[in-house]
Amino acid sequence: MFRIGIGYDIHRLTKGRPLWLGGIQIPFEKGLEGHSDADALLHAIIDALLGAAALPDIGHYFPPSDPSIKDIASATMLARALKEVRLLGYNVANVDSVVIAEAPKIAPHRDAMRKTIARLLGIPVSDVHVKGKTNEGLDSIGQGLAIAAQAVVLLSQ
């Protein structure tokens, strides 16, 4: 049996925070604003995992109103989501994802992201893909004000 889930996340860029994407810290003059470390790519993967298993979304498990999880690492959030999915008897078959950002460029960081995501999910690197796209100068992402991510996860049982 297979189940497919899709996830999406977007965060505003802001000065004074580190930039976390795909579980790695990327040198950049801005970071993503959020209650956690705001890793938009891991958040999209989390929602895709949870959605594929028909579980509640990321906000259910990690509400931004909960002060006890302020600045929580998205890798910790992913571990919790993966645990919930595995309790239902599912395994991650593969992940395909897109990071939409004008800057920084994703290509120089793609391999590190893929390795980190694969390690966090306990699957081979060959089952994880990360693509980088721009918005060609359009909207808040294109103007360099935000970074978004989309992910699709296939679960098997």
Image (cartoon, rainbow, N blue to C red):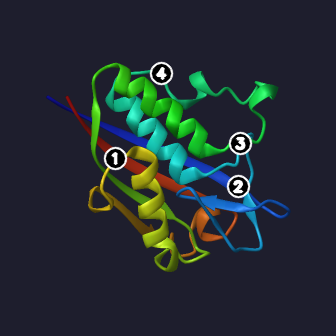
Inter-mark Cα distance, 1 to 2: 22 Å
Residue count near mark 4 (Cα–Cα under 10 Å), binned few <14, some 14–19, many ≥20 = few
Q: Circle 2 is placed at which residue position?
A: 12
Inter-mark Cα distance, 1 to 4: 16 Å
Residue at image x 60%, y 28%?
Answer: 59
**Left or right relative to 76: residue 28:** right
Q: Circle 3 is placed at which residue position?
A: 36
Q: Position of residue 13 (x, y in %)?
A: 72, 60
State the residue in front, 90 or 64: 90
Q: Amino acid at mark 3?
A: Ser
Q: Circle 4 is placed at which residue position?
A: 56
Q: Amino acid at mark 4?
A: Pro
Q: Are marks 4 and 2 in contact (CB under 8 Å)?
A: no
Q: Earlier in the sequence, mark 1 or mark 2?
A: 2
* Residue 133 in view: no
Q: Are marks 3 and 4 in contact (CB under 8 Å)?
A: no
**Left or right relative to 100: residue 140:** right
Q: Position of residue 150 (x, y in %)?
A: 44, 51
Mark 4 lies on a secondary structure that is loop
State the residue in front, 133 or 118: 118
**Left or right relative to 155: residue 40:** right
Inter-mark Cα distance, 4 to 2: 24 Å
Instruction: Give the quadrant of residue 50.
Output: top left
Residue at image x 45%, y 71%?
Answer: 110
Residue at image x 30%, y 56%?
Answer: 124
Q: Nearer the viewer, mark 1 or mark 2?
A: 1
Q: Position of residue 137 (x, y in %)?
A: 57, 75
Q: Earlier in the sequence, mark 3 or mark 4?
A: 3
Q: Circle 1 is placed at which residue position?
A: 152
